[in-house]
Image (cartoon, helix red, strand yellow):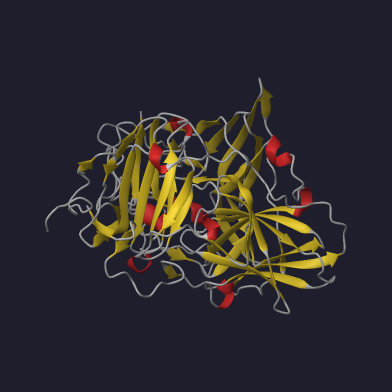
Amino acid sequence: MSERPGLIRDDGWSSTEWPRRRVFGLGGALVLATAGGLALSGAMAHRPASTGNQLRSAVPLPEPYTVPLPIPPVLEPSGTSKGSDRYDITQRQVSAEILPGIRTGLWTYDGTFPGPTIESRRGRPVTVAHRNELPVPTVVHLHGGRTPAASDGYPTDLVLPQSWPAPTAHHDQHDDGAHAMPDPRAVISRITREYTFPMDQRAAMLWYHDHRMDFTAPAIWRGLAGMHIIRDDTEDALDLPRGERELPLMIADRSFASDGSLAYPSLDPALRERPGVRAPYAAGVLGDVILVNGAPWPIHEVVTSRYRLRLLNASNARHYELQAVTDDGRRLDLVQIGADQGLLAAPVTHTTVPIAPAERYDVVVDFAGLPAGSRVRLINRLGTGRTREVMAFRIARRARESTHIPARLADDLPTWRRSEATAVRDFVFRAGQMQHGRGWVIGGRAFDPARTDIRTRLGAVEVWRFVADVHHPVHLHLVGFRVLSRGGRAPLPHDAGLKDTISLRPGESAEIITRFDGYRGRYLFHCHNAEHEDMGMMANIEIT
């Protein structure tokens, strides 16, 4: 294969330079399309609803819409000082009733799944002290946070439990796992670590979760996830639904073993030494039970008013295409007012909303005009059988409407232009060979914490172009971005606003633009199919 601009050998991440353009990791199976976007040669004709394999539960499952929707508690600060707030969270094992009448062991933040919601104000710093009482090391990442590198939750910056052996010069800082390699920059804590979040960012719903190298997927599956909502004056000035009419909804799929425990195909169920999952699930683990805020197919009483649904897909690998449908077949509009990183400039009306792992959508649903006692189901058009059902709303009574959706929501979205970009980089997300077998790679190489993959300057504007073999939700730490195109064409309506995760479908390409502002240091970008990232699909960005 000859090398030419736009095509690079598949044996490394070295790049050829052109003025203001850098190609990164283009494999020989990929070509530059004439439309200007990346195309996959011989792209998959069949595009499944989700990449992965489904586990089947071995216990009786409840009928949908028989369990009430829980609302995670809002955590109170343990202290305030000089304009900042402190929170204390203990990571611990509990036994809880997720399926009615069945006890399930969970790993939790403060004893609940999801973990407690933190609500903070823009510009008011927050310190969260996490105490690890679990049997394995943990790392906490605030997904979507503009966070200094020391508190971003780098996968090797571990918090060790009391019983864990201290790392030595001959012991990898994170694990003895098959994928493990030393990280000379790792910062190891014992039992407790304080994470500091400046909260210098737009109002948005973020989420926090475990990010331990090689074991992120099973840790999230066992319960280590919670929501973090930032509020500001801009959003407060709008007459959007609030209070009981604002619902944070964490959607996640799980499966259950015969003893009621969470079923997961780990090669090492203790999550101590050997990372990875059994071969049939290497593309992603899908559950057959849809949980919302930790409850299976719940139902929630509403009144004839607008409700703000803060949607988070916290599944490891499952994609959803959400639709609100009455029992007589009427589809309700889902009016999108926000994306991953906060309010849109103007509302966008959808009848369906696709949401990939780690994405968030802020939508308003209007239940006005529906009779008391009627029902609206939130369904997943990508699911089959029980996985087609998500949750339901029952209309309890009539109520006066006191909210409205303004034609203009926000004026503070960034307006980066292609002409400002100092680099254009191309990335290929695909299956590939790792040191110990097949895995998932970016540009033909698996993650190495000791390697700098991308180096950029603080304040630099860059255009990044992605191409995928199968479903890959790509997440950038620290920064938000705008979607410029898909397949060389205009973005899709649901791409509006400032995002930090973009869903790539099989054979699809996309372009984003971002500015690397905020902080210097080492950050990540990776696939947020959690099994993919555990099996090598991460890379380092060094901001100088």
Give the vertical position of 150 relative to 26 (above or below): above
Which quarter of the rendering shows the C terminus? top left
Can residue 51 be seen by looking at this rendering?
Answer: yes
In front: 21, or 523?
A: 21
- Can you give x and y, in whole percent of width and height, for residue 151 in the image? 48, 33
Instruction: Give percent across and percent down for residue 200.
Output: 57, 31
Q: Nearer the viewer, residue 142 or 4?
A: 4
* Tally of marks: 0
Quarter of the view holding residue 128: top right
**Residue 326 vs residue 130: left or right?**
right
Image side of residue 91 versus residue 152, left or right = right
Is 165 left or right of 54, judged from the image as shown? left
Residue 298 locus on image (x, y percent): 68, 65
Could you say where residue 487 lies in the image, as x and y percent from the top left? 38, 61
Quadrant in which the N terminus is drawn: bottom left
Task: Determine which quarter of the picture holds residue 176.
Answer: top left
Q: Is residue 158 above or below residue 242?
A: above
What residue appears at the point 27 percent right and 51 percent down from the top-left corner?
443
The residue lying furthest to the left in this view is: 2
Which residue is nearer to you in this view: 40 or 218?
Answer: 40
Residue 137 visible in the current orientation: no
- Say if 544 sits above or below 444 in the image: above
Furthest-top residue in this view = 82
Residue pictured at 54% horizontal, 77% vertical:
384
255 is higher (above) or lower (below) than 136: below
